[in-house]
Image (cartoon, rainbow, N blue to C red):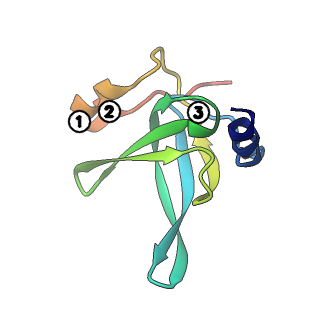
């Protein structure tokens, strides 16, 4: 069991910014197409975080061409090159699954004023 913990500690990223549920984030993801690699940007609202430690994931949702798109990213994955916080959201829930049923302005999250 200690060997698993050591391996898990080695793969934990320290430079990850602190983002919360409701924040709009821009994720740089490494995409492999055959032998080539490129960085793809995915921007959306964080609607959920799950797990802890190495296996922690977060779900990002955006609407693209009128269709809702959700992607789940492992926080400590080597394919996630960076996370940039675009804006902070003000929410009162731990999971924002109710945004799936909303359309237009109703699907927006209010910005947190600091």
- Is 112 drawn above or below residue 11 in the view shown? above
Q: CA distance from mark 2 to mark 1?
A: 5 Å
Vertical relation: 90 (above or below) 30:
above
The image shows residue 32, relative to residue 16, as above or below, that is: below
**Which residue is found at the position 42% from the left and 23% from the top?**
95
| Residue 114 point in image, percent of width and height | 68, 24
Along the line of sight, the residue nearer the viewer: 60 or 32: 32
- Mark with earlier residue (3, 2): 3
Q: Residue furthest top?
A: 92
Question: Is residue 43 left or right of 112 when viewed as pictured?
Answer: left
Q: Which residue is mark 2?
A: 107
Give the residue at mark 3: 88
* Percent position of residue 15, x then y: 77, 47
Crowding around mark 3 (Cα neighbors within 10 Å: few <14, some 14 to 19, many 20+) is many
Which class describes the residues within 10 Å of circle 2: few (<14), some (14-19), or many (20+)?
Answer: some
Q: Which residue is mark 1?
A: 103
Q: Residue at x 58, y 29 (%)?
A: 20
Secondary structure, mark 1, is loop
Q: Secondary structure beneath disc 3?
A: loop
């Amino acid at each position: 069991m200690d060997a698993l913990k050591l391996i898990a500690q080695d793969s934990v990223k320290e430079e990850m910014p602190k983002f919360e549920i409701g924040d709009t984030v821009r994720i740089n993801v490494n995409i492999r197409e055959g032998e080539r690699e490129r960085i793809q940007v995915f921007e959306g609202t964080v609607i959920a975080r799950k797990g802890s430690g190495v296996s922690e994931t977060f779900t990002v949702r955006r609407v693209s061409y009128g269709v809702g798109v959700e992607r789940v990213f492992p926080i400590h994955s080597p394919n996630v090159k960076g996370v940039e916080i675009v804006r902070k959201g003000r929410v009162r829930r731990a999971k924002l699954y109710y945004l799936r049923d909303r359309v237009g302005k109703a699907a927006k999250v209010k910005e947190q004023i600091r």
